Image: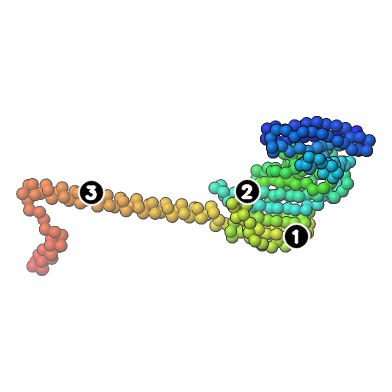
Amino acid sequence: VAGQWVTLHRVARDGAGPVDSVRSDAAGRYRLRYRPAGAADAVYFASVTYAGIAYFTAPLKDALVTGDAAEITVFDTTSRAVPVAVKGRHVIVGAADSARSHTVIEVFELSNDALVTRVAADSAGAAPTWSVAIPGSARDVRVGDGEISPDAFATDRGRVLVYAPIAPGLKQFSFSYRVPAEAFPLRVQAEEGAVVLEVLVEAPQASVAGASLTAVAPVNLEGRAFRRFLAQDVDPGAAFVIEVPAGGVTARNGFIAALLAAIGCLMLLALTRAMRRRDAERDAERDAARTAARGVAEPPPLPDRLAQEVAALDARF
């Protein structure tokens, strides 16, 4: 495409912004010359904005970048429905927290197999470029890392709505939500199917059934152990159910707390009895001292008094 502004960008910890720009020639070619500077972790890439949509190169890593690595492909846009396939769907279910809620993260890899960029119409109430259903119990839905801006993300009546442009090729985005422990078993539907479906659950006794999911070797992520379930070529409309036992970490911690409380009560009771026994012995010693001081003979021990009373009863009857 001729006459398009190609902009070179620099991104690093010490700052980010455009470095230089040049127009493409009649054959759509461009050339930029620059000297890397500043932080060693700086990343350079080139971009073009075409029909209101930004397109980028991969990071420019070599001293001389040509051919496919420097090529930027742009597309016409359409607000009509175009096929967007789910190449990958990853569902990660965390353990229950102190509020008995589980955080669920969903990561999608979407593929636009058409030759146009799918955009949302400018009219009010326009349809999103892509959407997916989420469980009705989902709360606090938030967009995560990926290629979707928070401004292009919305939720409505149990659905996540994406209004960002979807260019031909692969696009990745993620979102998270929270569900209470009481919502399990949790039913999730793969409306558009998936080439690869993966479910990770941070609970040793968790299980997942449906959508041809099969348990495979567990994985560790950031020091946390997850049970892993995997399926391929999942049919559109297939559903799966995530089961997390109610007696999870929270219940175990509650049992331990109750046990410690019971032990504490027993110890307190034993201490109270010991203090009462000590006070009674102290009072008895004090009474005996007072009696001795008055010259009154100390009464015989209880067994002797009982024997004397029994002998008196025998003599009387």
Residue beneath the point at 70% across and 43% down: 145
Apparent side of residue 50 relative to residue 312 in the rendered image (left or right): right
Tell me, yes or no, if residue 126 can be seen here. Answer: no
Residue 80 x, y percent position in the rendering: 87, 44
Residue located at (22% from left, 51% from top): 280
Answer with the quarter of the image where residue 36 lies.
top right
Q: Nearer the viewer, mark 3 or mark 2?
A: 2
Q: Position of residue 232 (x, y in %)?
A: 75, 60
Residue underneath mark 1: 232
* Res 23 visible: yes
Report which residue position mark 3 lands on.
279
As rendered, which of 152 and 112 lies closer to the eye?
Answer: 112
Above or below for 40 versus 309:
above
Q: Residue at x 82, y 48 (%)?
A: 169
The foreground one among 34 and 4 is 34
Q: What is the residue that sits farthest to the left in this orientation?
A: 295
- Residue bearing mark 2: 103
Tell me how far mark 1 sits from mark 3, CA to CA.
Answer: 76 Å
Mark nearest the camera among 1 and 3 is: 1
Q: Earlier in the sequence, mark 3 or mark 2?
A: 2
**Residue type marked 2:** Thr
Question: Which image quadrant for residue 123?
Answer: top right
Secondary structure category for the residue under label 1: strand
Closest to the camera, between mark 1 and mark 2, is 1
The residue nearer to you, when weighing 311 against 57, is 57
Give the CA distance from mark 3 to mark 2.
56 Å
Image position of 306 with respect to 20: above or below? below
The answer for how far apart the CA atoms under marks 1 and 2 are is 25 Å
Q: Which tag, 1 or 2, sits closer to the chain's start?
A: 2
Q: Amino acid at mark 3?
A: Asp
Q: Residue at x 8, y 47 (%)?
A: 293
